[in-house]
Image (cartoon, coloured by chain):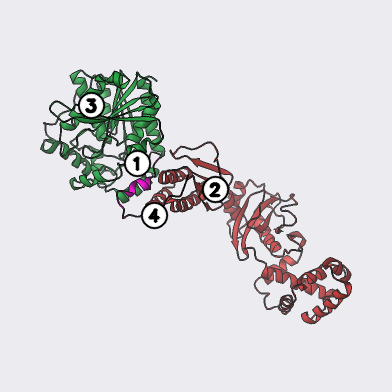
Chain colours: A red, B green
Amino acid sequence: MQELVGRLTALDAEATETIKVIAYFDVLVAGHASTQVILRGAAILSGCAAGFSSDDAVLRIDASGVRALEPCTRDGWPSHSFGGGMAWIEREGSAHANDDMILERLAIALGIAWERISPAAATRRALQVIIDSESTPQARLEATHRLRLVPRTLYRVSATPEDTILSGPSVVLSTDFGSIRAGLQATEITEVVEPTERAGIGISTPPDALDRSWASALIALRLSSEREPVVNAEELGAMLLLADATDGRAHDSPDLIALEALVQSQPRAAAILESIADTDSLRAVAVEVGLHHSTVQAKAAGFADALGFDPRSPRGRVRLALALALRRLATNRFD
Amino acid sequence: MTIATHPAPPFDVELGAVLAVIGEMLPPTITPELIVPFRQGGLLGTPINEIIGDRPIRHEERTIPGPVGAPDLTVSIFSRTDHVAGGPGIYHLHGGGMIIGDRFTGADEYLAWVMEFDAVVVSVEYRLAPENPDPYPVDDSYAGLAWMANHADELGIDVDRIVIGGASAGGGLAAGVALKARDLGTPTLAGQLLIYPMLDDRNETVSSHQIDGFGVWDRGSNDTGWDSLLGDRRRTENVSIYAAPARATDLTNLPPTFIDVATAEVFRDEDVAYATKIWEQGGIAELHVWPGGFHGFDAMAPQAALSLEARAARVAWLHRILGE
């Protein structure tokens, strides 16, 4: 099969191939062409087979324009990603001059078409609607049906870094704290991710209140740490309210400023302070961080001076725990 | 004169995209000044060996006698390297508005027929207008067919299974040669395959007005082609039915006919009318009208969905006609 752009070159050496390729895919996008037609466009323009995979769907068109039923025989074709999927052209031998441009425009066109037509994309949009506190009740109801959620049944939303693999429906959202994947789970599912992966597990709510579950999941994720990678919002108690109330306003808290200065000057301080806030005795801290008891005692005294309060006292431990939480909220990012 | 009051049907989305690319390269209207540049252009000019590629097809060039008193003609003969004698023959006439193209124009498709049917394809280099106006193109074309039928044994074909075919001007010439063969009583044809044929010099149908200044082979291009072929005789009573088969009033006793055409091209209405006239006179014709195609759509983008279906319909018809 011949490549259309190559065949036309001889007629007009002045016109750039780039414009032809862009014009081709622009017309397809404007005409709401199907993914198959768009993919065949790459076959028409390049003269070789083309394919894409996305959300478990794979489609290949051979060089003659026919849908190929057999799977791709090998990997490593020139490819280009689009919104969660990958498009490729099966060029044997060295690349032709227009291959890069064809791939780029193919990926753009497929991304637009795929968002419009794929069931997985529709599910993503529904999830996005149902966790958005700004959504109207009507939109929320439609999303509930699309996601096949049962009224008055409890679900919850999880918040994880973008590249986390979840089993249920999920959508990646751009937040102030990076690209976060929101996942939807039945409330009885206890283990959303591996215990070592970062996750915030939202509170359980019925379908019409999942925006609150998402908000709590996001706070839980922001409160996660290496020490505690998975944080369950239902175990946060008043910390949820505190996080909400202080968002964006904690940076001038004297405790947070002092804690930040201490951690910057002593890299190991953070781990010891986390341990102090979370365990019953300095002896337990010493075991956990692998230092001698007397060393920990000396460090704790030094921390008291630096912080302006004594983390060894019951009241000081609460202040420390709050300061550590404020610091995680302020600094945790998931880019 | 009929003037179109509605715009042309829209192009198929996929073919519209192809046209967006071609539009960068090809002016919709071929004026007389563009004939020479088009003959030199590369769109139709892929070397035949490249088109054959690795297909097991033998290509033989022969010089054969032209019409009485006219120069010799060149024909290309294509057959499978494992050809079995006694199969079908396909006599091919290329397109190009009577003014451009050569016997290899359309080879991509007729070579597929060589493989599919073990057919022997003969494609003739008929003389082009305006240097060689009517009746030279159709007379050359008839001479080639007569030679093919007379050399059936040598070519390894069954003389009773010769189909004539071509696209565009080649379709018009095929229709004209079929009329001439009918009137002269020889050769006998098993079928005529008329791919969006150019049939009517008058250029007065609704579709000929709808496709004007855009698309492929628009109204102005059609004027250029027919003016080149017929000169001052165009649109007069002095045009033979062999040059412009739409002029024929008697379409009886023709072989089974296949006609296809697209909705967004000049030839739509004259081609539909030709099929209708054959039916009215008790003949056998199969008509396909492809929505949203432009002239020559399947040649420009053989991979497009509509192109695949159009070409498959021709193959299916050939299977029935050739009794495979």
Distance of label 3 from label 2 (alpha carbons): 51 Å
**Marker disc for residue A18:** 4
Give the amino acid at mark 1: Met
Position of residue B196 measured from the top left corner of the image (x, y, whole percent): 29, 34
Identify the element where label 1 is drawn. helix
| Tag count | 4
Position of residue A15 measured from the top left corner of the image (x, y, whole percent): 32, 54
In front of the other: label 2 or label 4?
A: 2
Residue A69 in the magenta stretch? The answer is no
**Marker disc for residue B262:** none
Asked whether the residues under the numbered discs 3 and 1 touch, taking CB atoms below 8 Å apart as contact, a structural biologist would say: no
Position of residue A330 measured from the top left corner of the image (x, y, whole percent): 67, 70
Give the amino acid at mark 2: Gly
Query: In this view of the protein, which residue sits in the foreground, B161 or A208?
Result: B161
Residues marked 3 and 1, same chain:
yes
Give the amino acid at mark 4: Thr
Residue at 67% x, 59% y: name it: A212
Q: Does the image show residue B185? A: yes
> Disc 1: which chain?
B
Q: Is residue B279 above or below residue A51?
A: above
Name the residue that disc number 3 marks: B144
> Disc 3: which chain?
B
Residue at 23% x, 47% y: name it: B37
Residues marked 1 and 2, same chain:
no
Distance of label 4 from label 1 (alpha carbons): 19 Å
| The quarter of the displayed image where residue B266 is located | top left
